[in-house]
Amino acid sequence: MRMGMAGDVRVNGGFASCLLILLLFLSSEAVSDDDLFAPADGVTILSGNTSSSQRALSDRSHIWLVNFYSSWCGHCIRFAPLYKKLASAIKDWSGVVQLATLNCGARENLQTCTDYGITGYPTLRVLPAYSSKNATGDDYSGKREAVSSLENGIIQYLQKGESRLKQIPHLDPLSKLEDIWNDVGLHTKYTIVFFEEESSFLGRKVILDLSSRDDIVVRRMLENNAEKLGVKKFPSMYQINKSGTFDLLKSSISVHEQDLLSALSYSLRHEIAVKSSFSESSLEVLKGYIEVLSKYFPGSNNSTSVTFLHKLNSWLQAFKGDTLTSAMWLKGIQTLETEDAHIPETEVWVSCLGSKPGFRGYPCGMWLLFHTLTVRAADHSKDPAFKPKEVLTCMRSYIQEFFGCRECAKNFGKGAVYIEERVNTADDAILFLWRSHNKANFHLHGDETEDPAYPKIQFPSRESCPQCHLEKDGDEIKWDEGTVLTFLKTMFSHRMLRSAEKGVGLSGRIARLRDQELRTRVLASVNAGSMFSSLDVTSANSLNYCVAFSPVFEGFSLLTSLVMSYQ
Ligand SMILES: Cc1cc2nc3c(=O)[nH]c(=O)nc-3n(C[C@H](O)[C@H](O)[C@H](O)COP(=O)(O)OP(=O)(O)OC[C@H]3O[C@@H](n4cnc5c(N)ncnc54)[C@H](O)[C@@H]3O)c2cc1C
């Protein structure tokens, strides 16, 4: 049976040229040995005679989306990167849908394409689960201009009821909250409801993202029913308790190693390198900065970034020439970088990602970097050679000498004159920087540089650390500084850092995606998986989820990245 051809094969200039190329190809019997896809792209690459494709596609427990293309066709070449991104974005849906490709431009596949009735490229076909060998699939009729529209198209197909999946995740909304208990099984640990507007696809995507987890049940409920329950914010996610009560999954705060690495990369490759050459005094500042980084930058001794910093430190401390130029500095970095010792080439922001270009990013990363260094340094406070002021004086010098924002350097410098007088222990240093940062937050609250999605607050908020806040004295917050110290030591500890090492986990996967839309999409899909599995290992009775919305995704006007947790 064929679905409508809308959005699939269109008779236009591009299609006509693809047909022409096909005809030329047929007449000349040219052989295409290049290909647009590789196994690493996360798609099944079909090839050979018809029966081998039929064998691969038939009788599977999931549906297939197959891209019949020709490596000679311009449309196909342009579509291939999108298809690869789709494969990466819906990797966690593999129990429900998988992607395949067949290059009809290769001579050995020609008969197969004819047998499947392919007349133009690219043609997308959907094959239901448990298809027979003779099934040729339905033409995909959804939109295909972006990853999110392809995902929506797959969801629409699943909801039409023709997928023949034996175990299809429940994508339809609940009308009564208590119906969720019908889905709960022996292994269910978490029962979650996603409240959203009717037009939103996000809840269904989250359900599919988590479809392989039998310990999590996620259902969605639409705005009209949710409002009766007192839920007013959409989208939002709640954990449902057996008692029938439900708790909003709230913000939690964490530091992503990717942000620290991005700040480090920008600082070393750009900010420092802007100077054409370093005077004797700026060379001293640089040496101090790299030494502190090599001692306290988080990561195990064999992590690629720490190994690189150790090498860079040895190289710089051994530098005895009169003048270090920017070119020598960059060449030094390049020479020292190896597969086992390097830092990222470019910056990818995770928790420092602003809602629009120009917001957050590097200065946010630098704050996080220096807070982390003060906390990491405190782990070494028992060493006889430990110097409690070291990180802060290094930061002051770096900001004065290299930080691109000169106004910031001036403002920070005013407060930093008190380091000598007020910092005598590692804990003093942590709290000193926290106060300085809060002063900056106070002055910048409401400023035009403030990202409206991330208002500057006196940190930590009452919501994230109720015990840190004593009673308010007028406008001024009274802090329990002992509790604040514990909070900061936890937040910036190595244990809490979300790893980017070797691309493992959420931040690593995000880091590999250059496309912001997909990155924010992956934040929604991946973090749940990685956080849940790490929590399972420690048997912690807590739940984390991260959902991000970009301006281009689902029509939300602002990017708001919410890391939600329930404990
Ligand atoms: C040293 C320095 C001085 C600066 N001075 C100026 C200035 O004078 N004028 C100006 O316009 N901009 C200044 N900036 C930039 C500004 O402070 C912000 O970094 C920038 O506006 C981006 O803000 P953000 O919303 O990403 O949050 P940021 O203020 O950059 O904070 C990043 C993250 O740090 C955490 N955090 C927030 N407050 C604290 C705290 N008190 N203790 C511990 N963690 C905290 C939060 O998780 C937050 O998301 C300065 C930056 C630096 C690094």
Image (tube, helix red, strand yellow):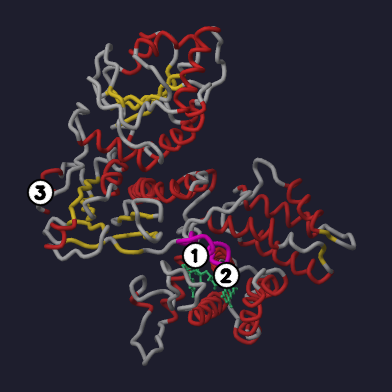
Q: Residues within 10 Å of mark 2 (few under 14, many from 20)?
A: many
- Magenta stretch containing residue 361, yes or no? yes
Task: Classify 346 as above or below 17.
Answer: below
Image quadrant where one finds the N terminus? top left
Tell me which label, 2 or 1, sits earlier in the chain: 2
Question: Does the Cβ of the disc 1 residue fall within 8 Å of ligand 1?
Answer: yes
Res. 492 mark: 1
How far apart in space, not on screen, are marks 2 and 1 (Cα)? 9 Å
Which residue does the numbered mark 2 point to in the structure image?
A: 374
Q: Which secondary structure class fits the magenta region best?
A: loop
| Left or right: 382 in relation to 79 | right
What percent of the width, then of the height, locates residue 290?
70, 62
What amino acid type is highlighted by mark number 3?
Answer: Asp
| Disc 3 target residue | 179
- Report if the CB atoms under discs 2 and 1 are less than 8 Å apart: yes
> What amino acid type should be assigned to the residue bearing mark 1?
Phe
